[in-house]
């Protein structure tokens, strides 16, 4: 799987680590102004996806939730997340299956906006909500 991450959404500590690695330690990230923009593309093994869905940084979990090839197991894991952006990405992803949508609807972290998006999702049967 190719995982695309918005670099500016990575935590500052991760950005600093990248800069230090790219400069082979010759640049102090704390004193060097860098504008982080663009996308970081990673090729990730499918075996690693469940672990990233549970333990990845919020921006990683959000990217998985928005993934065009999202599958049921991954969606159900992400539907239990408490991060607003992860739940929002799942609610907007047309690949999110019905069972994951039900989990999002029951998730106490889901806001009324997210629940409204779940209610109009094409995989949500009207009889469920």
Image: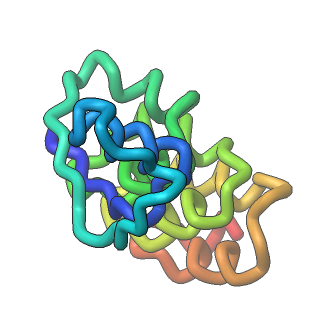
Residue drawn at (22%, 40%), measured in percent from left and top?
A: 22
Q: Position of residue 45 (x, y in %)?
A: 20, 23
Total of numbered circles in the picture? 0
* 85, 13: nearer the viewer: 13
Q: How is the image coloured?
A: rainbow
For the N terminus, the image quarter is top left
Q: Position of residue 120 (x, y in %)?
A: 53, 82
For the C terminus, the image quarter is bottom right
Q: Position of residue 67 (x, y in %)?
A: 29, 54
Task: Identify the image quadrant of residue 104.
Answer: bottom right
Extreme residue toward the top, this view = 47
* 48, 18: nearer the viewer: 18
Q: Position of residue 12 (x, y in %)?
A: 54, 53
Q: Is residue 24 left or right of residue 14?
A: left
Residue 72, placed above or below residue 11: above
Residue drawn at (54%, 44%), measured in percent from left and top?
A: 13
Q: Is residue 109 visible?
A: yes
Q: Is residue 60 visible?
A: no
Q: Is residue 105 left or right of residue 52?
A: right
């Amino acid at each position: 799987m190719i995982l695309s991450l918005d670099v500016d959404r990575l935590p500052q500590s991760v950005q600093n680590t990248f800069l230090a690695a790219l400069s082979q330690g010759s640049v102090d990230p704390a004193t060097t102004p860098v504008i982080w923009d663009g996308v970081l593309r990673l090729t990730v093994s499918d075996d690693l996806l469940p672990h990233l869905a549970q333990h990845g940084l919020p921006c990683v979990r959000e990217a998985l939730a928005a993934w065009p090839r999202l599958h049921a197991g991954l969606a159900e894991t992400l539907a239990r997340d408490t991060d607003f952006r992860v739940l929002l990405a799942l609610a907007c992803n047309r690949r999110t299956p019905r069972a994951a949508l039900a989990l999002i609807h029951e998730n106490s972290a889901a806001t009324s906006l997210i629940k409204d998006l779940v209610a109009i999702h094409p995989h949500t049967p009207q009889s469920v909500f």
